[in-house]
């Protein structure tokens, strides 16, 4: 269990350092589409490391 959590944390930290916010959002959307529907956008923005306003712009560009 601890090793699994460590791998998840490491993957997230690596993505924060090496990927753009848009790439992080798209990865989250493809990995967990149900999460996008049930979690408020302000928490998703925080998780991918952007402000809610930046997430709104990202979502507008994608659609």
Image (tube, grey):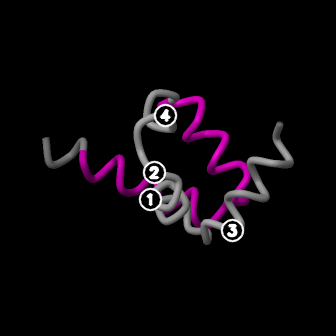
Image label count: 4
Label 3 and label 4: CA atoms lie apart by 18 Å
Contact (CB < 8 A) between labels 4 and 1? no
Image check: 57 left or right of 19?
A: right
Q: Residue at x 73, y 52 (%)?
A: 22
Contact (CB < 8 A) between labels 4 and 2? no
Query: 28 above or below 55?
Result: above
Label 2 and label 3: CA atoms lie apart by 13 Å
Disc 1 is placed on an element classified as helix
Q: Which residue is mark 2?
A: 40
Please state which of the two labelled residues, at mark 2 or mark 1, is closer to the viewer.
Answer: 2
- In this view of the protein, which residue sits in the foreground, 28 or 3? 28
Q: Residues within 10 Å of mark 1 (few under 14, many from 20)?
A: some
- In this view of the protein, which residue sits in the foreground, 47 or 12? 47
| The disc label shown at residue 37, or none | 4
Contact (CB < 8 A) between labels 3 and 1? no
Q: Which residues are magenta?
A: 5-32
Quadrant of the image for the N terminus?
A: top left
Q: Residue at x 57, y 56 (%)?
A: 15
Q: Residue at x 51, y 38 (%)?
A: 36
Q: How far across and down, in percent of the image, does residue 12 sit?
A: 46, 55
Query: 35 above or below 8?
Result: above
Label 4 and label 2: CA atoms lie apart by 8 Å
| The disc label shown at residue 43, or none | 1
Image check: 16 left or right of 22?
A: left
Quadrant of the image for the C terminus?
A: top right
Q: Residue at x 56, y 67 (%)?
A: 49
Contact (CB < 8 A) between labels 2 and 1? yes
Check if residue 11 falls in the magenta segment: yes
């Amino acid at each position: 269990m601890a090793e699994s959590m460590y791998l998840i944390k490491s993957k997230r930290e690596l993505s924060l350092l090496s990927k753009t916010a848009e790439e992080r959002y798209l990865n989250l959307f493809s990995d967990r589409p149900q999460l996008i529907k049930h979690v408020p956008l302000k928490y998703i923005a925080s998780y991918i490391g952007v402000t809610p306003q930046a997430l709104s712009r990202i979502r507008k560009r994608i659609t």
